[in-house]
Image: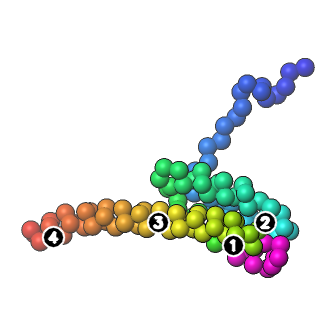
Amino acid sequence: RISPVSPRISPQVSVPRLVTLRFIARYVQLAQPLTSLAEGWPKLLALFRAAMVGSSSAPVALLVVLWEWVRRMEPLGDGSPLLSAKERHEAKDVAEALLRATSTQLSRSLRRTERGARPAAAAAAAA
């Protein structure tokens, strides 16, 4: 019997990073029960670290995911993984790295905008 999908040929679907992060953010917003979301912290932390390798194309989206996760953990009280000093330290480190990446991305964007505005201003002044 022949399988409809050969194990050697797997269909690949390319999904833009931002779409993936929006999906993850929405999952974090709606996941139930909260304890399962709390148990997923190590995987989410690994996602943040992997996404920040090199230059992240979406640090703001990553910040949204982290913010949502932290916000959802508050009602867990003693069940929150953030009670551990190690987990708090890791979350703080990730947040700081994401803020730096967001700042860098914003600075680059502003420089590009300024460069684009200068030729237009020079052309308007020459007219």
- Residue 77, image x and y in percent? 81, 79
Residue 72 counted in the magenta span: yes
The residue wearing badge 3 is 100
Tell me the distance, in whole angstroms, between the alpha carbons under discs 3 and 4. 36 Å
Image: 99 above or below 50: below
Lower sequence index among marks 2 and 1: 2
Question: At x 73% / y 66%, what residue is drawn?
Answer: 28
Foreground of the two, 41 or 12: 41
The residue wearing badge 1 is 70
The residue wearing badge 4 is 124
Tell me the distance, in whole angstroms, between the alpha carbons under discs 4 and 2. 56 Å
The residue wearing badge 2 is 38
Q: Are marks 4 and 1 in contact (CB under 8 Å)?
A: no
The image quadrant that residue 43 belongs to is bottom right
Question: Which secondary structure lies at badge 2?
Answer: helix
Tell me the distance, in whole angstroms, between the alpha carbons under discs 1 and 3. 19 Å
- Residue 26, image x and y in percent? 70, 65
Question: Which secondary structure lies at badge 3?
Answer: helix
Foreground of the two, 31 or 53: 53
Q: Residue furthest left?
A: 126
Question: At x 71% / y 27%, what residue is drawn?
Answer: 9
- Residue 18, image x and y in percent? 57, 57
Question: At x 18% / y 70%, what residue is drawn?
Answer: 121
Q: Do the residues labelled 3 and 4 touch (CB within 8 Å)?
A: no
Of marks 3 and 4, the one in the foreground: 3
Q: Which mark is residue 10?
A: none
Lower sequence index among marks 4 and 2: 2
- Residue 127, image x and y in percent? 10, 69
Question: Would you say residue 74 is visible in this rendering?
Answer: yes
Please report the bounds of the magenta region as a residue range.
Answer: 71-80
